[in-house]
Image (cartoon, rainbow, N blue to C red):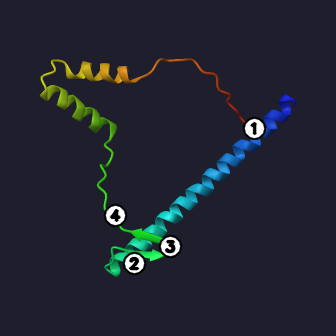
Amino acid sequence: MSIKNDIVELDKINVEIKRLYTETRVLRKRAKNIEERILVYLKEKDQPGLKYNNTAIVVENKDRALPKKKSESEHDIIRVLRDNGVDDPLSVFKQINEAKKGEIVEKQKLKFKKLI
């Protein structure tokens, strides 16, 4: 197999990946809308769930923590460190963030630019 064939195949694969991503995004959005309609129906009928084609659909309440903004999260961590008696909470916070990072390894990546 020649390098030209490899490049053409890689380009086709990338186009297909992009198409599938777009398609799944549309399908996820559609599924979410349908789930919302089912929830509204169950709420209107005041039912905890329903059965359809050997499938039970039940409304389940779940608690979920909303994500914080990065700056808000950093501020809260520094406050907790300060409240627990850490002398220099900002430098400890920076050290913790550095400790979370893995070893830096150089990696090669191909970059494609369309020439017109």
Asked whether the beta carbons under mark 1 and mark 2 sit within 8 Å of each other, the answer is no
Mark 3 burial class by Cα count in 10 Å: few <14, some 14-19, many 20+: few
Asked whether the beta carbons under mark 1 and mark 4 sit within 8 Å of each other, the answer is no
Tag nearer the camera, 2 or 4? 4
> Residue 41 got which mark?
2
Secondary structure, mark 3, is loop
For marks 2 and 4, the one nearer the N-term is 2
Identified at 31% across, 19% down, the residue is 95
Specify the quadrant that holds the C terminus.
top right
Which residue lies most toward the bottom here?
45
Asked whether the beta carbons under mark 3 and mark 4 sit within 8 Å of each other, the answer is no
Secondary structure, mark 4, is loop
- The Cα atoms of the two marked residues, 2 and 3, are separated by 19 Å
Which residue has dot 1 on it?
Answer: 10
Asked whether the beta carbons under mark 2 and mark 4 sit within 8 Å of each other, the answer is no
Which residue has dot 3 on it?
Answer: 54
Three-letter amino acid code at the position of disc 3:
Asn
Q: Is residue 21 left or right of residue 95?
A: right
Tag nearer the camera, 1 or 3? 3
Which residue has dot 4 on it?
Answer: 60
